[in-house]
Image (cartoon, rainbow, N blue to C red):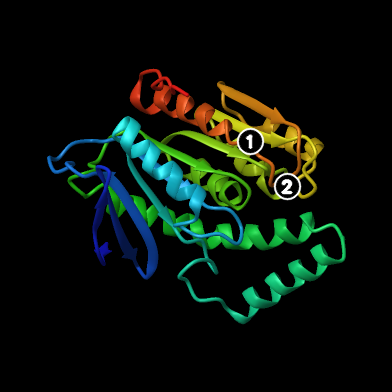
Amino acid sequence: MRFTSQTTANGVSERPFTVDGVPGVLWSPADATAPRPRPLMLLGHGGGQHKNAPGVLARAHRYVARFGFAVAAIDAPGHGDRPRTAHDEESFAQLRRKMAAGEPVGALIAEDNAARATQAVPEWQAALDALQHLDEVGAGGPIGYWGVSLGSMIGMPLVAAEPRITAAVFGLVGYDTLTDAATRITVPVQFLLQWDDEIAPREAGLALFDAIASPEKTLHANSGRHMDLPRFEMDGDERFFARHLAGRPAPTTVA
């Protein structure tokens, strides 16, 4: 792992890094210097986004400031600071054409994202190996994964394959390509579903939730389309991870 810079704001240290050429970011408490096993959150961004997307950045700062977690994100293949192949460009162009024409895009997204997940899972595991060697993270602490849409397409096979991850939030997916991974996930899961999702229809999302083998799994369903996930679900995610990674209730938010 090679760090390229460091900035600190409001008690949160931000350190961009690369692992085997894959760019990422680590956020941690500014005073996190002593060796310790610290809870670690892995954040998966959505399609067309990147490791510093506003939603990723907001979550990272909240988990560090409110819970003292370390948080990491990496760019998915073909996203952010990673180069795009000719195949990437054609896939993105085809997706834009179909969306502009009002045509269904779920099958195209599922095929494209499944290929990206095959590459991204070992990249996440390499990043996790490196992160656990850092003093501000340490080995043996609880690890959570949060990611919806593309973040779930990558996150579900990652969690299925990675025994170090102890709790996860998924959602906005419902593709058959994820069924096998779902049947191998046994950690606590919170699943987010948009009732009117035009990309991952509710029936497919419900079937995928049903396939998850976790003894503890919770479904959060909200009205709205794919991009209409309510902001208040962030509070629910925090309560979930506070319980499973920190072993305590989330702090109460005062309006």
**Residue ID for mark 2:** 175
Count of numbered labels shown in the rendering: 2
- Looking at the picture, which amino acid does disc 2 mark? Tyr
Give SS at disc 1.
loop
Looking at the image, residue 137 sits to the left or right of residue 110; the answer is left
Residue 105 placement (x, y as % from top left): 79, 58
Disc marking residue 4: none
Looking at the image, residue 195 sits to the left or right of residue 120; the answer is right
Residue 166 occupies quadrant: top left
Q: Hey, which residue is sitting farthest left in the picture?
A: 34
Residue 253 placement (x, y as % from top left): 44, 23
Q: Is residue 26 above or below residue 97?
A: above
- The crowd level at tag 2 (other Cα within 10 Å; few <14, some 14-19, many 20+) is many
In the image, what residue occupies the spot 80% across and 63% down? Answer: 99
Looking at the image, residue 135 sits to the left or right of residue 201; the answer is left
In the image, what residue occupies the spot 47% across and 71% down? Answer: 82
* Residue toward you, 161 or 15: 15
In the image, what residue occupies the spot 65% across and 43% down? Answer: 180
In the image, what residue occupies the spot 64% across and 34% down? Answer: 192
Question: Mark 2 or mark 1: which comes first in sequence?
Answer: 2
Residue 93 placement (x, y as % from top left): 72, 74
Looking at the image, residue 223 sits to the left or right of residue 68; the answer is right
Q: Is residue 28 above or below residue 231?
A: below
- Looking at the picture, which amino acid does disc 1 mark? Pro
**Residue ID for mark 1:** 230
* Residue toward you, 238 or 255: 255
CA separation in Å, label 2 and label 1:
22 Å
* Residue toward you, 52 or 145: 52
Give SS at disc 2.
loop
Q: Hey, which residue is sitting farthest bottom in the picture?
A: 86
